[in-house]
Image (tube, helix red, strand yellow):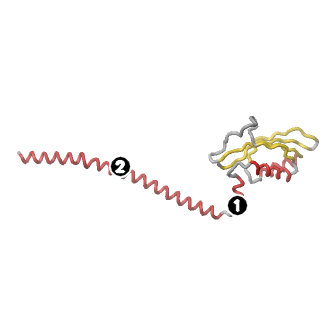
Amino acid sequence: MARLLVTTLFLILAGATVYFLILPQWEGIGATKVEIGRLQGMVDELAQLAERRDALRDVYGSISEEDRKRLAMIVPLQPDTAASVVDFEIIAQRNTVTLQTISFLDSKSRAAPLAPTAPQGYGTIPLSLSVRGTYESFLRFLDDLEHNLRVVDVTAIAFGGTTGNVVSASLNGVMFYRR
C-alpha cells in the first residue's frame, strides 16, 4: 500500500512538474521560434534594401556632376523664386515678348501662397505671369517654357486685348520644389 501511495505521489509530482514547469517553457520556446522567424524575415528584407541601396549608390556615382546640377535645376531643393524670375526674363527676351508681371502668390488672396498639392516630398509654388508680344513670339515663348529645365505646370492661359499685331496673355500654373 505504501508503495502504491509513493508511486501515486511520484506520478502526481511528476505531472505537476510537467504542467507547471515544462509546459510554460515549451510554450515560450514556440513563441521564441515565431519571433525568430519574424526577425529573420526582417533581416532578409534589410539585406535586400542594402543591396538596392548599393545599386542606387553605384548608379548615382555614375552620373556626371554636370548632369547632377541639371537634375537639381529641374526640381530644386528650395522654392528659389528669384532664380525663376531671371529664367522667365531670359526666356521672354529670347522670344521677343515682354514680361509684364510675375507673381508667386495665390491669385485669389494675393497675400499667401497656395497650400502644397504636390506628391509627398514635393511642394508647389503658384505662378501667375503676363506677357505681351506677337502671337508667334508668344507660341515660341510657350515652347521655350515647355523645354525649360525647371518643371512648370501651366494650368490656364488667358488672352487679353490685342493692339495691332501685339497680343497680351496671362499664364497661371505651378512650379515644383523638393522639401
**Badge 2: few (under 14), some or many (20 or more) residues near its Cα, within 10 Å?**
few
Label placed on residue 67 = 1
| Mark 1: few/some/many CA within 10 Å (<14, 14-19, 20+) | few
Left or right relative to 52: residue 174:
right
| Residue type at numbered disc 2 | Ala
Name the residue carrying label 2. Answer: 31
Give x and y (percent) for residue 71: 69, 56
- Whole-percent x, y for residue 44 in the image: 47, 57
- First in sequence: mark 2 or mark 1? 2
Picture quadrant of residue 161? top right
Query: Could you tell me which secondary element the residue under label 2 belongs to?
Result: helix
- Farthest-out residue, right: 164
Q: Which amino acid does label 1 sit on?
A: Asp
Q: Looking at the picture, tell me which residue is in the foreground, 137 or 87.
A: 87
**Mark 1: secondary structure:** helix
Identify the image quadrant of the N terminus: top left
